[in-house]
Image (cartoon, rainbow, N blue to C red):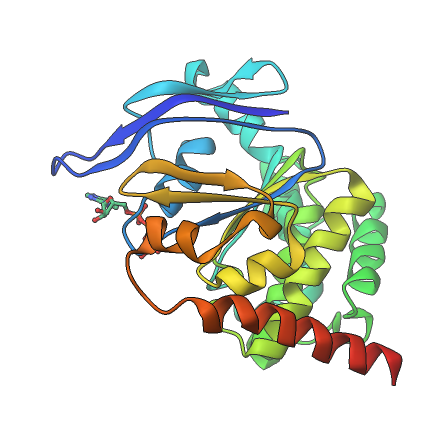
Amino acid sequence: MLELKKLTKTYRTGDKALQDVTLTIPKGQVMALIGPSGAGKSTLIRCINRLVEPTSGSVILDGTDITALGTGGLRKMRRQMGMIFQEYALVERLTVMENVLSGRLGYVGFWRSFLRKYPQSDVDEAFRLLDRVGLMAMADKRADELSGGQRQRVGIARALIQNPRLLLVDEPTASLDPKTSRQIMRLICELCAERDLAAVINIHDVALAQMFVERIVGLKAGELAFDGKPTEMSEEVLTSIYGEEDWQATIRNVDDEEDAEADVAAS
Ligand SMILES: Nc1ncnc2c1ncn2[C@@H]1O[C@H](COP(=O)(O)OP(=O)(O)OP(=O)(O)O)[C@@H](O)[C@H]1O
């Protein structure tokens, strides 16, 4: 279980990116974080693993106060938090397999990782994960030979080989086309369900979040503006988070997409 208590971040510039955010994310829950640009979504995700240092408040994962950890403790804790980024952050000249295995770097010793000698159990697990994300045939390809969707699948496998307790996902579909975006969101949510793994997903696309996750949290100017089920997302809620706009298209979109998906599944 992840608990954020009165999490606050004020950057040196004076920007109040987060203000008193209190949230509890139970084990196995996938939560989408939405909100306009600058609302504090990336800051929130980065405060959880302290890539950004919170100004005050605490982050507690399964009873451990992450905000109170020293350097060594934080390094160990970060291994338990898988991170998936928008831009994949793969090593271009390495193979798919090597990129996935790099998720184990925090676990194997320096020389072993320097020589890229991973234990057989890690290699076996990497093959299992590549199979699960549909990339078994690509294991020996270089990362720079892959499509955006394939690259994100490698990023997902790399995060999962850490055997994390929590997934932090920052704009996983920002560079992908709509169909690939849905496939990636579906894959992330299925994998979390299979592993009873909690995830916080920062996502711009409200309709996509509504389609796949069980809980949506809206941020506005660093403060909680909505916390509820996708079905509770209404035009009023969207207006309160994003301001005046014609939201009918966004909300209707979800129904249309679901109908379309159902048609495909039925055909
Ligand atoms: N390193 C930084 N130094 C100073 N201010 C920052 C820094 N990073 C973010 N901010 C500010 O903090 C606020 C929240 O930014 P953040 O990137 O968390 O928002 P976001 O919701 O993720 O936005 P986007 O959807 O555009 O990525 C913004 O006002 C931003 O300008």
Residue 238 vs 10, above or below: the answer is below
Q: Nearer the viewer, residue 200 or 215?
A: 215
Name which quarter of the figure residue 207 lies in: bottom right
Q: Residue at x 71, y 80 (%)?
A: 260
The x and y percentages for residue 158 are: 65, 53
Q: What is the count of numbered marks?
A: 0
Residue visible at 84% across and 77% down in the picture: 265
Rendered-image quadrant of the C terminus: bottom right
Q: Position of residue 199 (x, y in %)?
A: 61, 42
Quadrant in which residue 63 is drawn: top right
In the image, is 149 to the left or to the right of 239?
A: right
Q: Is residue 173 visible?
A: no
Q: Residue furthest left?
A: 13
Q: Quadrant of residue 94?
A: bottom right
Left-right relation of 258 to 38: right
Position of 168 relative to 183 (above/below)? above
Q: Is residue 30 left or right of residue 172?
A: right
Could you tell me if residue 53 is visible in this image? yes
Which quadrant does the N terminus fall into? top right
Q: Is residue 112 above or below residue 24?
A: below
- Left or right of 146? Residue 264 is right
**Residue lying at 53% horizontally and 60% vertically, measured from the top left:** 172
